[in-house]
C-alpha cells in the first residue's frame, strides 16, 4: 500500500470515518507474497513510495500477468517495463484500463488514488531522435511516480545553438534527465549550464566503437561538469525513479 | 562571485548600504580569466552556486598555486582536490588559512562569507575501512558546498546486521552517498531500504577481478534497487556535488 | 558404470549371487568409446560418481541421439543440457522414458538404479523470476546427481527483508546455490548469513552494462563475504555438480 | 566469540563450573563494535565459525593494529592478510605471539583455544613455483580455520606426468585447491581426475595476454571438467574459507 | 599458376615437349586481375605455393562465383571458405566438379594437377564434438594444400586418459593442430607431450565467460607448454595454411 | 541554406536581381525547426557547408520521411545514411528524384544547385571485397559533399605488390580514405607511401578476435606511419565528411 | 633530404650554381642506413616532406644519440619525441643547438634551411590545464613541420561560454587540433562549430572509468559532429603530422 | 637428458665403449625431482629435445639458483629467461660459465655437448629498435635450442621499401619470426611475401590504445596473410621454441 493511501487511511481512522477493525484488516495484508516463481514485495509502496515495478524482460507472459494482477489488486496501480509487443498486448487485455506505450515498451495501470504530485517538473532532454524510446520510458515512469514532465528533443551538441536556445526550459526544471547515445557529450554541456540535479542516461544508439552504449556511459561517468550522476545504459526507468526520489524529498 | 554574495550585495544596494557604483565595480569582474595555462570560469559560482573546484592531478605546484590564488581573490574560497602531498603542503602555505586534509587529499580555503546552509543532511556510508579516503573527499567537498554531513563507516553486506542496525540514521538522511569497493553490493541494499536519493561511489579498493573498481562500478550501474545513480570510480567529490545539487534544490 | 552399481556388483559377487565371469564381463566394457564424432568417457561414472553429461549446444540432433544412446546403454541414465527445443523433442522421443524440462532446457533419463542419495539438501536461491531457467537447470542436474533440492525464488536484495525472512530455510541447507543476474549482490548477503558452502551462479539477466552477466560475475568474484565460490555465467549445471561433489564428500 | 567457545561455555554452565551471571557477562559483549574508522563484526565468529579476518591492503598501520587488537581481545585469535612488510612487522610486534609469514603476507595470532579440527585434509596444488605466495596465503588461512593441509608444488600440465604421478595424494584429499597462473589449465585436469570438491584460484603469474590473471580466471570459469568452482585472482584466502566451509559442513 | 605447374612447364620446355612461345604465353598471364569489386592475386600460387583462397563471408553470391571462376580458370583449383549454405549451393553448381562440405562451410574445386604431396601428416585433435566444424575446415584446407591429415576427436582434458591413450597417433604426426573451445586446456597438454610443432585453434564453443572463444584464445596464448603457436578464433583454415607452410618447408 | 546559395543570393542582391525584401525573406527562415521528435539544424548548411545528414538507424520510416522532407524543402538536397531496405524504398518513393544505393544503404536527393566542386580528388582504397559497403557509403557521401572520387579495390597487404603497382593513383590523390577490416594493416602501408592526408576507416569485416572491427581500429590508431587519422568502425560517411572538410579548406 | 632542399638543389643545377657531379653526389646518399639496431629511412624527407621522427620511448640514450646524429648529418634537422628527462639532457648536449622542451618531452634540432611555411595556421585547443603536455608535443611537432600554431587553453565544455567566446580564433584557423581527456566532449562541440578539419587527440587525463584515455577516445570516435578524425591517446605528435599533411596539401 | 645425449649413450653401449650397468645408472635418474618449491621435469629434455627452461619472473634468487643448478647438474645446460638484473648477476656467478645477456634478460649455460644443429636458419625481423629486447630473447633462446639465427632490424611498414629491399634474406630463411609492437602490421606483409612458416610476436612497445601490446596481438591474429601464427605478447622465448620445433622436425 502506497504511503499516501496509508496516511489517508490513518486520517480516516482518526476522524472516525473508518473503524479500527476495518483499518487493521487493510493493513494486515502480508508484506510479501510468494507465488512460486516470484516473491512480490508489497511493502515497497509503503517503504519507498511506489509499488514494485515489474521488469518484463525474461518473464513469460503468464508470469507477467500473474505478478501484475497481484500488485494491481492492492489498488496502487502497476507499471511493467521492457515488455515485448505480444506480451504487452496480452497484459493490457488482462489488466483492464492499462495503457500500452509501444515506443516506451511499457504497460501502465494508474492507481485508483492518484499519486501525490511532486512540486516542480522533470525535464527530459534527448540528443537525437533515435534516443526517443529511452526518453519515453523515463517519461512514462516519471508520470507513474507522480512527477510532471517536460521534454527537449534532438538538441545534441553537434549543433550547440539548439540547446543554448532553450535556456529558459533548462532553468525552469527541478531535475534534468539527459538521454544521449553516441558520444554522450550533451550531459556535460547541460551539467555545466544548470545548478539543479542532472541524471545522465547513456543509450545504445550508435555503432562500431559505441559498443552498445559503453562510449556514452564512459563519457558521462567522466563528465567534466561536476555532479552529473549516471544510470545504466538505456535505463530510462531508473533515471525516472532517481528523479522521483529527488522530487519527493 | 557566489549567488549568496550577489544576493547580499543587491540587498545592500537596495537599502543604501552600498552605492550603485561600488556594486557595479564588484559585479564588473570578468567572468573568465585567462592566465596562459588556464581559463578560470569565475562565472561558475554565480551560475552553479559554488566556485570552480580545482582538479589537482596533472598540474604543477606552480599552476595550482596560481589558479587557486586567482579564485581565492574573488572571496568565495577555493577547493582543490587530488593534490599530491608535496603540492598540498606548498599550496596550504601559499593560501593563508587553507586546510589540508591528508586522507582526502584536499586543500580547502573557506569563503569569507559562509555558504548558505542546505536543509537536511548528507549521510556518507562506507562498506569498509579502506574506502575512507574517498568518503573523506566526499565529506570535505560536501562541507565546502554548504551541506551538513554524517557518516556510517564499515557497514558492508558481509555482516548485513551492521547496516540494518542503523535504520535510524538512514531514515534521518536527506541524501545518502554509498561508498564501496570490491563487490559494491552495499548500494543495492541501501537503495532498497530508503526512499531518498542514493548516490553510489564505486572505489578502487580490491584486487584481481575488481579491475581497479570496475566490478563495483558495474554492480552499482546494475543495481536491482531502482533509482540508484552512480558517479565515477573514487569520485567522492562528484558525489558531493551531486548531493549539493539536490540539497540546494 | 556408476560407483554404486560397481559396489553393488562386487557385493553380489561376494555373496555368490553373481558369478565371477558374469561380473568380469560387465566390468570389461571399454572405458572410452569412439564413435567418429565423439569419444565417450564411460569411465567417468566410476571415477566421478556420475556419467558424462552431454552438452547439447553445437551438436546436431543426430549426434545428440547417438551419444545419449551409447551412454544410456550402460544403464546409468543420461543427462543432456542446453538442448534446443526441436532437438529436445527428438531426443526425448529417442530415449524412452526421458523427461524434457523446457525451462531448464534439459533432457534427463533416470538410471535404472537410483543414485545414492546424499545427506542433507541443496538450497537454490534466485534473486529474480528471470533467473529461473538457470536455477531450473541447477535443480534438474542436482536431482540427477542424487541430491535433494529446495528453492527460494525472487528474494533479491532490493527488498532485503525477503531473504532475511527465510533464515530458517537458509540455516537448514547443507549447500546453497545463489543464482542472480544484474548486480549479483545476493551472493554476498547470503554468504555473510550462513556458514555452509555458497556457490554463486551469475546469470545473463539484465541489459546495458550487465554485459551479458559480466557485472554479476565480477560482483560474485569480489564478494566481501569470504569463501563464496563462483561458476561460469548461466552455468546452473556446473553449480549442481559442485554441490554434488560436496554433498557426496 | 567462536562457536566452539560458546558451546564450551554453555557446557560449563550446564555442569555448574561457570555461573549464569558470569556466562551472561561473557555473552553480553556487543556483536559489533564501532571505532570510528571501522565497525567490527564480532558476531561473525559465532555466525560463521571464524572471527572477522582483516584485509590489510588500503589500511594504515595504526588502523590495522587497532582493529586487530579489538578482535584479539575477544580471545579467538586474529588473521590479517595482504599486509605490507613494514606494517606486518609493526603488527607482529603489537600482537604478542603473532606469526608473520612473509611469503603469504599474513600476520596470524592463534586463538587461546584451538579451533575445532575438521575431518580430512585440504590439498593445495600449484602449477608453478611462482604461484607459491598465493598457495601460502591459502595454507596459512586454512590452518587458521582449523583445517589440516597438504601440498603438491609445481606440477603444471606442461609435464602432465608430474600430476599423474601423484594420484595417491589427489585421492587422499577431502578438498583440493588448485593454484595456477598463465593458462590455468591445471584446474581442468585435476577436476577431471577426482570426485571431491575442487576450488580453483587463478593467479596473476604471467605477462602479456595473461592480463594480470584474467587468462587463468577465464580458463577456470570455462573448465570442461564440471563442478570446478572459482575464486578471485590471487585470492588464496578466499579459497581457504571456501574449503573450510566444506570441511566443517 | 602453382609452383608445381611452373616447374613442370619449365621441365617440358627443357626437354622440348613445349615450345618457348607456348610456355611464354602461359607465363605471361597478368599477376593480378582487377574485376571491379576485387583484385585477384594470381601470383600467389607461384609465390606461396597455393592460389588465393576466397573468404566467403561478406561477399555476395555473384561476387563469389565471379572471383572463383577467374581463379579456377587458371587451372590450379580454388578453395572458398565460410560460405553460407545458399551461396555454397549456387557456387557448387557454377564450378563444375566442386565439392561442398556443409560442416566445414567450404566449396573446393580440386586442381587439374594434384598438389605436390608433403611428407608426413597433419594430425587434427579436437577437445569436443562441438569443435568439429572448425576441425573440418582445417582438414579440407590442409587437403587442398597437399597435406595428408588424420584426426583425434573429443579427447578433451576433463577425461585426461582419452588423450594419453592416443600417444601413438600423437607421436606419428609431423604437425599437430589442436582445436578446442571452452577452457582450451588441451593445447597445453598436447604441447607438453610432443616435440613437433603444435598449432592451437581456439573455438567459439562455450557460453558466458567464454566470450565467444576469448577464454580459449587466452589460455592458448599463455600456454605453459613452450612453443605452442596460436591462430584466430575458429580459424581452421589459417591453422591448415600454417601447417602446410611447415610441411612443405 | 548552403553557403553557395547564400553567396549567390547576396550576389544577386548586389546586382539588383533580387530585392532586399525578397532576400530577407529567404534568409529569415528559422535556423532550427522543431517537429516533436526532432530539432532540425537548418543552419548547418550555412555553418558547415552541407545540410544536416540524417542518420537512419533507430528512426521509424515515418520519422525519416518527415525529417528528410523538411530538409529537402530548403532546396539543398538531403542525404540519409544507414537506411534499412524497406525504409529506403519508402523514402525514395517519398522524395521524388532521390537515389537509393542498396550497397551503401543510402538515400540521396541531389540539391537543385550542385555543390561547389572541390579541387582534386578523394581516393577510396579498400583492402578486400567485403569492405565494399563501407567504401560505397564513403563514396556516395563524398559525392554529396561535392568531391570527385576514385577507387582502388581489394589491394590488401597480403599481396603487397597490388598496392605498390598503383603508385600513380596514390600520388594523384588529394586525400586518401583507406577502408580495411581484419588486420587493418593497409592504412599503415599507404600512410608511409604518400604525403597527403590519410583517413583510415576500420571495418567490422572479420571474425573471432577481430571483435567487430576493434582489431582494425586499434591497428589504425597505432599506425607506425605518422599522421594517419581514424574514424569510427564502418563509418564511411564520417571519413567522407573529414575528406570534404580538407578538400573545401 | 627534404623536398625543399632537393628542389633548391635542382634549381641551382639549372642555373649553373652547382655542378652536376656535385649534385649527383648529394643525391647519391643511400635512402636507408643500417646501424645494427636501426634502419634509418633517410628517404622519408623526400617522400613525405619531413625526416623520420625518432620515437624516444624504449630506446637507450646511446641509441637515441646515434640515430639522431645520423639523421642530423643529412642537414634536415631532427625531432625526437617522448624522451625521458635524463636522455633528453644527454641528447641536447650531443646535438649542438637542439632545444629540449621538458613539458612536451621533445628534443628538436632545427634544419639548416627552414621548412617551407604552410599557409594558414593550426589552432591547438585544450579542454584543461592537465592536457598541456600533449598539446605542447603537438605544438613543437607542428612547428618542426613548418606550420604556424596558435592556442586556446582550458576551454572545456563544463563552462561552454569559454569556447563560445572564442569564435573568432576558431574561425581563423585552417586546421584545429582538439586535445581533451576525461569526457573528451570538447571535440564534438568544436566539430559542430567549424567547417575546417578537426583532429581530436584523447588524453590520459582522468582516473577511474577514464581507463587511461579510453573514455575520451571512444567519445571522439563516436562524435555526433561529423567528420572529426581521431589519433591515438596522448598522440600530440601524430595530430601535428596529420595537420601538416593537410596544411602542405 | 637430451635426446642427443641418450642417442650417443646408446651408441656407445652398442659398440662396447660403455657398459650396460654404467649406461643404466645414467638413465636411471628420476624423471622429476621435487625440491619443495619446485618439481623439476628432467624428462623434458628427452621428450622434447631441450631441458626445462626456467621462467625467472616471480621466483626468488635463491629459488632460481637452486633450480638452475639441479638442471645444470644433468649436463644439458640450462636457460633462464626474464631474470631481473640483480638475480641475473647472482645466477651467472653461481653457474660457472653462464652468459648473462642484459638486453634479453637471459642467463644461459651451454650444455657440455652442443645441441644437434638444425638445418637452415631462423630469421628474426623487428619492426623497430624498441622491439630489440624481445628479439634478443628469441635469438638467445633459438641459439640455446640449436638453431642458427639471422636478423633484420627496424624494417617496419611505415617505410615499406626497407623490408622489400631485403627479399634475399627473407627468401633464404627456413622460418621467420616477426617481432613488432604498435600496429604490428609487419607480420602481415612478411606473411604475404614468403612461403615458409611465419611466427609473429607482438610486443608491448607503444602507448595509449596499444594497450600493452594488445593492438599488435589482435593485428597478428587477424592477419590477412594466411597461416601466420602468433605467440603471447613479448614472448620471444616462445617464438624461438616454436621455430625449433619446426627446424628439428
Image (spheres, coloured by chain):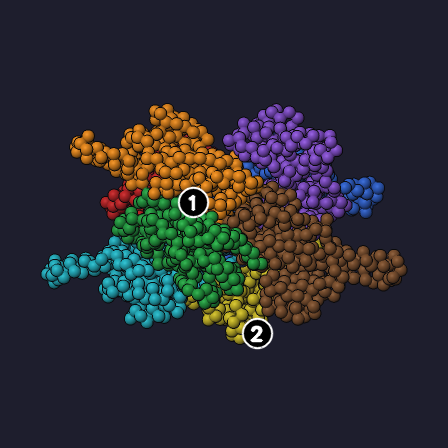
Chain colours: A orange, B green, C red, D cyan, E blue, F purple, G brown, H yellow
Residues packed near mark 2 inside 10 Å, few (<14), some (14 to 19) or many (20 plus): few
Q: Quadrant of the N terminus of chain D?
A: bottom left
Q: Residue at x 30, y 65 (%)?
A: D66
Name the secondary structure under disc 1.
loop
Query: Residue at (53%, 73%) from the top-left corner?
Result: H89
Picture quarter containing residue D123?
bottom left
Disc 1 from disc 2: Cα separation = 74 Å
**Which residue is at a point 31% across and 40% down the rendered structure image?**
A48
Counting from the top left corner in percent of width and height, residue E121 is at: 60, 48
Q: Residue A207: horizontal and vertical position, in percent? A: 55, 40
Closest to the camera, between mark 1 and mark 2, is 1
| Residue G240 position within the rendered picture, expressed as x and y whole percent measured from the top left | 65, 54
Mark carried by residue H97: 2
Front residue of this view, candidates B128 and H77: B128
Question: Are dots 1 and 2 on a single chain?
Answer: no
| Image position, residue G193 (x, y; %) | 60, 44
Q: Residues within 10 Å of mark 1 (few under 14, many from 20)?
A: many
User: Which residue is the site of mark 1?
Assistant: A196
Chain bearing tag 2 is: H
| Front position in the image: C125 or A111 | A111
Amino acid at each position: 500500500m502506497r504511503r499516501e493511501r496509508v496516511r489517508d487511511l490513518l486520517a480516516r481512522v482518526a476522524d472516525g470515518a473508518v473503524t479500527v477493525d476495518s483499518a487493521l484488516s487493510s493493513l494486515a495484508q502480508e508484506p510479501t507474497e510468494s507465488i512460486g516463481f516470484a516473491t512480490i514485495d508489497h511493502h515497497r509502496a509503503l517503504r519507498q513510495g511506489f509499488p514494485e515495478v515489474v521488469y518484463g524482460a525474461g518473464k513469460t507472459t503468464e508470469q507477467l500477468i500473474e505478478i501484475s494482477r497481484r500488485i494491481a489488486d492492492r489498488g496502487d496501480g502497476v507499471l511493467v517495463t521492457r515488455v515485448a509487443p505480444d506480451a504487452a498486448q496480452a497484459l493490457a487485455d488482462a489488466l483492464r484500463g492499462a495503457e500500452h506505450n509501444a515506443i516506451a515498451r511499457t504497460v501502465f495501470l494508474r492507481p485508483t488514488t492518484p499519486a501525490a504530485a511532486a512540486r516542480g517538473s522533470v525535464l527530459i532532454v534527448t540528443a537525437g531522435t533515435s534516443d526517443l524510446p529511452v526518453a519515453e520510458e523515463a517519461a512514462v515512469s516519471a508520470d507513474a511516480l507522480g512527477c510532471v514532465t517536460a521534454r527537449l528533443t534532438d538538441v545534441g551538441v553537434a549543433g550547440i545553438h539548439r540547446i543554448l536556445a532553450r535556456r529558459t526550459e533548462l532553468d525552469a526544471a527541478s531535475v534534468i534527465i539527459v538521454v544521449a547515445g553516441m558520444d554522450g557529450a550533451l550531459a556535460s554541456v547541460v551539467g555545466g549550464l544548470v545548478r539543479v540535479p542532472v541524471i545522465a542516461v547513456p543509450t545504445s544508439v550508435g555503432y562500431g566503437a559505441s559498443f552498445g552504449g559503453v562510449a556514452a556511459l564512459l563519457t558521462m561517468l567522466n563528465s567534466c561538469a561536476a555532479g552529473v550522476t549516471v544510470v545504466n545504459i538505456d535505463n530510462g526507468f531508473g533515471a525516472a525513479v532517481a528523479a522521483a526520489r529527488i522530487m519527493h524529498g
